[in-house]
Amino acid sequence: MRLLLLISLLFTFTVSWFYGRDAPDRWSVGGVWPLPQKIIYGSKNRTLTYDKIGIDLGDKKDCDILLSMADNYMNKWLFPFPVELKTGDTDDFIITVTVKEECPAGPPVHGASEEYLLRVSLTEAVINAQTVWGALRAMESLSHLVFYNQKSQEYQIRTVEIYDKPRFPVRGIMIDSSRHFLSVNVIKRQLEIMSMNKLNVLHWHLVDSESFPYTSEKFPELHGVGAYTPRHVYSRQDIADVIAFARLRGIRVIPEFDLPGHTSSWRGRKGFLTECFDEKGEETNLPNLVDPMNEANFDFIAEFLEEVTETFPDQFLHLGGDEVSDYIVECWVRNKKIRKFMEEKGFGNDTILLENYFFDKLYKIVEKFRLKRKPIFWQEVFDNNIPDPNSIIHIWKGNTHEEIYEQIKNITSKSLPVIVSACWYLNYIKYGADWRDEIRGTAPSNSRYYYCDPTNFNGTDAQKELVLGGIAAIWGELVDNTNIEARLWPRASAAAERLWSPAEKTQRAEDAWPRMHELRCRLVSRGYRIQPNNNPDFCTFEFEEPPARKSEL
Amino acid sequence: MRLLLLISLLFTFTVSWFYGRDAPDRWSVGGVWPLPQKIIYGSKNRTLTYDKIGIDLGDKKDCDILLSMADNYMNKWLFPFPVELKTGDTDDFIITVTVKEECPAGPPVHGASEEYLLRVSLTEAVINAQTVWGALRAMESLSHLVFYNQKSQEYQIRTVEIYDKPRFPVRGIMIDSSRHFLSVNVIKRQLEIMSMNKLNVLHWHLVDSESFPYTSEKFPELHGVGAYTPRHVYSRQDIADVIAFARLRGIRVIPEFDLPGHTSSWRGRKGFLTECFDEKGEETNLPNLVDPMNEANFDFIAEFLEEVTETFPDQFLHLGGDEVSDYIVECWVRNKKIRKFMEEKGFGNDTILLENYFFDKLYKIVEKFRLKRKPIFWQEVFDNNIPDPNSIIHIWKGNTHEEIYEQIKNITSKSLPVIVSACWYLNYIKYGADWRDEIRGTAPSNSRYYYCDPTNFNGTDAQKELVLGGIAAIWGELVDNTNIEARLWPRASAAAERLWSPAEKTQRAEDAWPRMHELRCRLVSRGYRIQPNNNPDFCTFEFEEPPARKSEL
């Protein structure tokens, strides 16, 4: 007991003294991530006791989204730290939530308002929002104002006035469930952490060359043959669960079915892929391009995509289109039937014309869903082909921010909207604080994730309006359930802030760091595996590994 | 139901067809990691049923190490997969364990035998070992022979004869609990995984500039001032727990107290550090070198190390000695008192002589413990100073394997034993299968961890005998509870095999891969976070994230 006292005494002398690491006196207290558009703190804090805090949902008491929000925050996220919860001794503290629009039955639509006002006084908290999505963002901000006061050993909340709304409508994470399978539970964890960073889009790269975990009802041969094993699939119910879980957190789920390349896992569909040949003319084991000669393939794609649109309610549909050129030689140039077909069509030797032929037919299929679905294509469809004028171009190439900005400028100058991923290829790990520092490594994106600003190019206002936002990508070649969470976070938080907050207030990583550190420690206390990304430091309450459980699949 | 049947049917056609990833038909079935010295498989496998398997510890029935082993393997590690355990229907299968030497009261001593014979027939398994440590290694090998047969839906074990012993006596992992704190629970998990890789040394880099989590009974001001917070410490009981836990798994714990640099967290001890000065002659906030002028410091070090030797039973004691030159200018050259002291001692301007002075006095202290403790120093003490002839030199520098081999050759030519870490700086992450492929990144070690062979230099047999082994290092600047496990494994498994197995049989990563994949999936099923480190692939049973729990500290 005497020893403990001694330690406490000594500790009070040390908090201002640190070597080679970040000092707690730099960490924010009740800092909000991402930085709101406008935030004015009051000078006083208010003690929060678990049993005196309440929430009033006004006339939206039956809205499942708000009920789920109330449950999550009141029972979990507002009081995350492993300390004894004090009761009593304070007046009631009621959070009043007022939402103008009706409770939506579906997930957020593109461009839906996420605007909110949040006022926290010593007596109450007031949230005003146009939509439930704005209320969700406000509640997350409110939870960031709560901190644990070590001295008084109690939870406190900062008084504040916030006006907030996102800078870009599309702020997302791309996951890849083909190279390695990701369990529904792990995807849900990422959705939770996304909502804690006010991200609103899950781009689900569902299938790729390696495996086809999407369960088709109409075409069960696709996952039947293309999944790694019958265990490595998402059932129809799994997909519905993910979409519903995301909706409750204000997140859209945009599925990707990449065509016509990266398709070898679709091989369960007879006749879908062209035969491919090596240099000696021997057939290879690696068909990876759709066969454009087979008319039935387009009927199949139409029927398949119809099911996809019934499965995924989002207005956007990602149809890939990347890296076709990687397979052209093996699968089209060396394929005699294809060459004959090209001659017949008058394409000569120009495989680009054959690609265009494929894409034209794909656009016509998309046309069927035009009012319901806006297609997204990876940038090659712009770089090499003729994009559907209705499509969104998704940028993934570029070794430097400047190269990426140049592409954004170029594409928007053709009046096409863009989504940017090239700045945030988070699977390409590097040693060091890569969200902040210049570190050489695999491109695109390299490092300095915090410094990418997608409208930082010389263009018109109309062009800048066409920048819909960004999606941080974590491709799956070396990522699975074991490591996705720590690799994503808090590196993706850097993107989340730049996509939400005013550009002029988020120019310097060193200004962001104190809040990012608090965010990391807050989410660690909520049970998430948010890794260090600074020099040596610590959280007051560290992450604790839960007891191991046997693998489940 | 029909759908499920269809899937199963289709699946049988697909297992031999893969794109861009590793095929299951290449994965080993009942492969042992690390590769034994000699292993001959029988042609038949034997079904294992949970209730018919028994273990006979012979005359060592009261040995706590063997009892713990029996408990772990019989109840957990032999049957890790998430499948229904079948009972009955087979004859008994008894594992008979015969150990010659007595059950040791302490942890393994340096060079203790880990040799074993293991025979698995259709009717029984027989383990013969000189020591309990050999029995532990045999049992781990036995557990690698067990696999889940998908077709018959039952556990089976391969029949086999194994003769095995390690190539090097020192095979370890270095953890750093100063830059970021690591909880006891997380350290224990790494010890478990180490034992599953037959590693036998935990090098615990306990304290460094940033924090002092070691709890000293005699000098509580050290952790009182130097720990991040009073929560970020290892109590005396924590340390004893770690040592006891390691002992039960055949692992020694070698503590490191780095002197005279990297010591700013020792500042709780008044007068221990010299004052340091910036270019303008202003005193800096960063004392990081012991004050060699103060005689009391040597008495203190002696007394402190006495406690350390009472705390840690291992015969080795790591005393650091690295990167002194990083602080020399600020803390010694610019320090007037030090300069005066150097003049008085006749050192002139030669700070190396002052370093030697410090180390000489340190060696005299170690002399007191000579029969009990063999000191380990980082290589600078060899490179720049005069090492104690009794010491072990720990190599951490070198950009290529060849540079590292050259240093091993050089140091062993002076009759000093070496431990090699330079090949395995696992904190320096790179994108890709860095255990196997050449990937540019932060040195030392770069990549290709599997290809480092510490005796691969032109030297005498006597020199090669001086190579004690290797320790894979995971420094803590960017590593904590959230990410240490996935970063370490299975990259450290590459080192584990090269340090245990015959050099001539472990020359090619592609030969090792089928067993490494099985190892990864086996340990994933045991509940450990072993990340992918190949191209796209999968485990039959994937890792599942346990339910989050709030942070504990």
Image: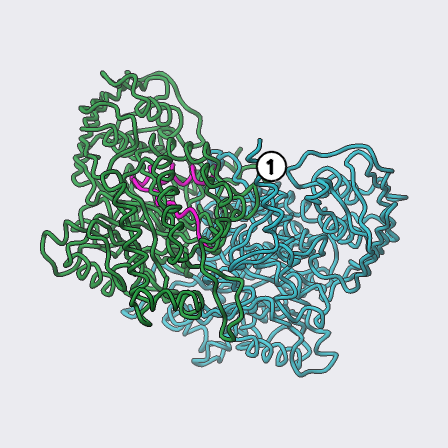
Chain colours: A cyan, B green
Q: Residue at x 38, y 47 (%)?
A: B301
What segment carries the magenta color?
Answer: B185-209
Q: Residue at x 37, y 31 (%)?
A: B244
Q: Would you say residue B203 sits in the magenta stretch?
A: yes
Q: Is residue A86 above or below residue A378?
A: above
Quarter where residue B447 is shown: bottom left
Outermost residue on the front side: it is B344
Residue A31 as seen in the image, left or right of residue A45: left
Residue B386 as seen in the image, left or right of residue A502: left
Residue B525 as seen in the image, left or right of residue B140: right
- Residue A170: percent from left, percent from top: 68, 63
- Residue B452: percent from left, percent from top: 25, 56
Q: Is residue A471 above or below residue B461?
A: below
Foreground: A441 or A343?
Answer: A441
Q: Would you say residue B509 sits in the magenta stretch?
A: no
Which chain letter matches label 1? A
Foreground: B517 or B504?
Answer: B504
Q: Residue at x 67, y 62 (%)?
A: A497
- Residue A84 seen in this snapshot: yes
- Residue A171: percent from left, percent from top: 66, 61
Where disc 1 sits, the SS reads helix
Foreground: B53 or B363?
Answer: B363
- Residue B14 seen in this snapshot: no
Residue A257 as seen in the image, left or right of residue A98: left
Which quadrant is the C terminus of chain B positioned in? top right
Marker count (numbered): 1
Q: Is residue A37 above or below residue A477?
A: below
Q: Which residue is mark 1?
A: A5
Q: Is residue B296 above or below residue B126?
A: below
- Residue B184: percent from left, percent from top: 47, 38
Amino acid of disc 1: Leu
Q: Badge 1: few (under 14), some or many (20 or more) residues near its Cα, within 10 Å? A: few
